[in-house]
Amino acid sequence: MIKRATGFNATFDRKEKGTKATHYCPGCGHGIIHKLIAEAMADLSIQDRTVFVSPVGCAAFCYYYFDCGNVAGPHGRASAVATGISRALPGKVVISYQGDGDLGAIGFNNAFQAANRGEHFACFFVNNSLYAMTGGQMAPTTMLGQKTTTTPFGRDPANEGYPLKVCEVLNQLQAPVFIERVSVADTKRIMQAKKAVRKALEIQRDGKGYAFVEFLSPCPTNWRLDPVASAQFVTDQMEKVFPLGNFRDRSEDVPLVPIEIPRLSPSQLFGQGQEGAAAKVDRPFKERQFKFSGFGGQGVLSLGSVIAEAAGSSGRFVSWLPSYGPEQRGGYASCSVVISGNTVGSPTVDEPDVLVVLSQQASEKFARTVKEGGIMLYESSLPAPAVNEGVKVIAVPAGKIAADNGTPKALNTAFLGAMTALGLHGLPEEKVLAALDASFATKPQLIERNRKVYRAAYDWGKGL
Amino acid sequence: MRKFVKGNEAVAIGAIYAGCDTYFGYPITPASDIAHVVAEYFPQLGRVHLQAECETGSINMMFGAAASGKLTMTASSGPGISLMQEGLSYLAGAQLPAVIVNVMRVGPGLGNIGPEQGDYNQAVKGGGHGNYHSIVLAPASVQEMCDLTMKAFEMAMRYRNPAIVLADAVLGQMKEFLAFPEKEAVKPDTSSWAVHGDASTRQNLLTSIFLDNELQEKHNWMLQEKYSSMRTDAQAELYLTDDAEIVLTGYGTSARIARSAVDRLRADGVKAGLFRPITLFPFPTEHLERAAKAGRMLVVELSNGQYRDDILAHLDRDIRCHVALVNRMGGNMMKVEDVEKKARELLEVPE
């Protein structure tokens, strides 16, 4: 009756060697829709550059037929798979072919979000008002009162809600370029469907963006009607709920221009690290474990990080581990630093050699964890902590030193200066200062101010 | 070049040097800063970063990108990884290369965002449906977060199989010095199987459907042979095991704690060693057998014994070895001291 479309394989060998018959039931709309797509692909000479994504459903075997690159993914995910392909292969033609359970139910969010991002692919959506392959169950597109195997008394809006009108939903979005609903119930309607398919693929050929075509399509097997009555059902019943027509054609609009981002190579991106400062094994070096604690915003994490960076650039093995959590803005904050002469084992510090606390909560939490022979520094405005025997405690007027030197927030820097003066990190001062300066790389105006606080705290420490 | 970076950043750096073309992700703590770094760097390198609508979206976008012959990755944590399991099965079935980084957090359910290793079985045994395996690599340092991400891409592409980098919240959040890779990996030629949207790949098809029982069985046997052949890639670290009377074992952060315990025991004259698997699938069985000669093995893990069960499963039945477990859950870490104590107890057990 109709001549073979040129976009199909000559024989459907992926189905069965040499066969020319499809797997569809008599009177099914998929065959017609396939033919429209295959013809348009061939007419537009895009077969070489087209990748076709099959759905899961009756059309799971699109790849038997279409003579182009083919991919078959999970149920409902064709729009996500098509997104991956079109992002990976910009400039190619990508087609996602999906049924109404696949797209309208399980995969609706993937389809909807792809449409909303304006992904560059054509989405062909086949609406036959039910799940056909799995035995005629209700789909989101099942009409009110329609009997299916899971709505034996008819779809009841009180129980199953209302038919999902996908074109109307997508038409609320800004990004789609083209949205149209067509039918394949008779020749006149098929001719209109053919135009819509061609338009959707031209939009892909020209790289203009997202195109969506919904097909009202008969399913004689599950509707338990003959092919003629099925076609009539589409026109008489489905069109009332799902009116045909073009919702949108913005293919002549000026396309969006992406933000221009400078192009770099990896070495240009990362070219500012240190050269040749690998850690050296130093067995006699006694490992030192530090804990820094306070509340968020006091800079305890960066205090630990500056010491760790300085240790790393001094040839030590080092790890830095923050506590982190939902309380990262405001609440309690702490970090553990381990400086070693060999590969660092556990990066967590249970019993620090040196504990630095900037808040009362931190003081109460950790004061008793300091190991015998260890030392605890605390902000002098806080109450004196209770520590275990054999632990030395030093009150550091860090807040006062920072304020007196013009940068009240820099009490973490004051602790750093005091630690250098007291010999608590054992690192060369020039490495510590370099790491301190580097921590303000994005705010260079703070470098000198922090150095001033550091120096004042250092002098305080030396005067002890 | 060396830089002081977070483990999560090291993952992104490894991906860049591996030649990763596309990244699809969805926010989740404690993995999100991988996406932050990728979102900043990838566009500047002319590569693709896209925030998906959900993890189901991410993994299926990866399916599409992998089918296109491109190197693709995502990073997530427990709940997000659970949502990707169907996609992992499809990737394995269609033989598509992809890298999935799991910065493990606490479960089950929403759990919390602390460190745990409770996703061991999900990663190593399958997680999705059907007869498949993912390649699973277990970094234990910031350096390995980078290096094993690169290796994951290389193995994923070589075997055309999904590869999981199984990290945890400590490894993701901690900072150490990273020695950068010296050069970018060479891009493999995928034209024999992928769809590039060109004439030479027009006949290619990527699918996991085999309607014919015989064909499906043949496909499954072929996959099993592939998984067996991965044995040659098994990798582990054996630390001070040659003369050991007790061997501690753990992967990832647990291995770091175990290593500290070994050092403390050795400092006290106790002959302790460490067996640290670097590949969890394929499992380094030969290394395990060498370590098990100590006769006593202490498993250290941040989960309910999943890893210990696998040690027992992999141990040759002819090797006599006491196996004990020290573990914690909920986001808590075992103390080095507690591990050391448990090791001493195990040494008291008669042969």
Image (tube, coloured by chain):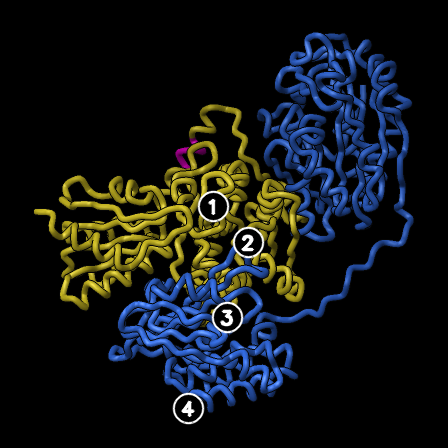
Chain colours: A blue, B yellow
Compared across the picture, whether A247 is left or right of A209 comes to right
Q: Secondary structure at mark 3?
A: helix
- Which one is earlier in the sequence, the residue at label 2 or at label 4? 2
Q: Secondary structure at mark 2?
A: helix
Q: CA distance from mark 1 to mark 4?
A: 61 Å
Report the residue marked by disc 4.
A462
- Which one is earlier in the sequence, the residue at label 3 or at label 4? 3
* Magenta stretch contains residue A355: no
Q: Looking at the picture, how far across and down is residue B176, in whole percent?
A: 44, 69
Mark 2 chain: A
Which disc number belongs to residue B161? 1
- Position of residue A426 relative to residue A121, above or below, is below
Q: Looking at the picture, how far across and down is residue B66, in whole percent?
A: 57, 48
Q: CA distance from mark 2 to mark 3?
A: 17 Å
- Count neighbours of disc 4 (C-alpha within 10 A) and say few if under 14, some if 14 to 19, many if 20 or more: some
Q: Residue furthest left?
A: B350
Q: Nearer the viewer, residue B94 or A351?
A: A351
Report the residue marked by disc 3.
A300
Q: Which residues are magenta?
A: B218-222
Q: Nearer the viewer, mark 3 or mark 1?
A: 3
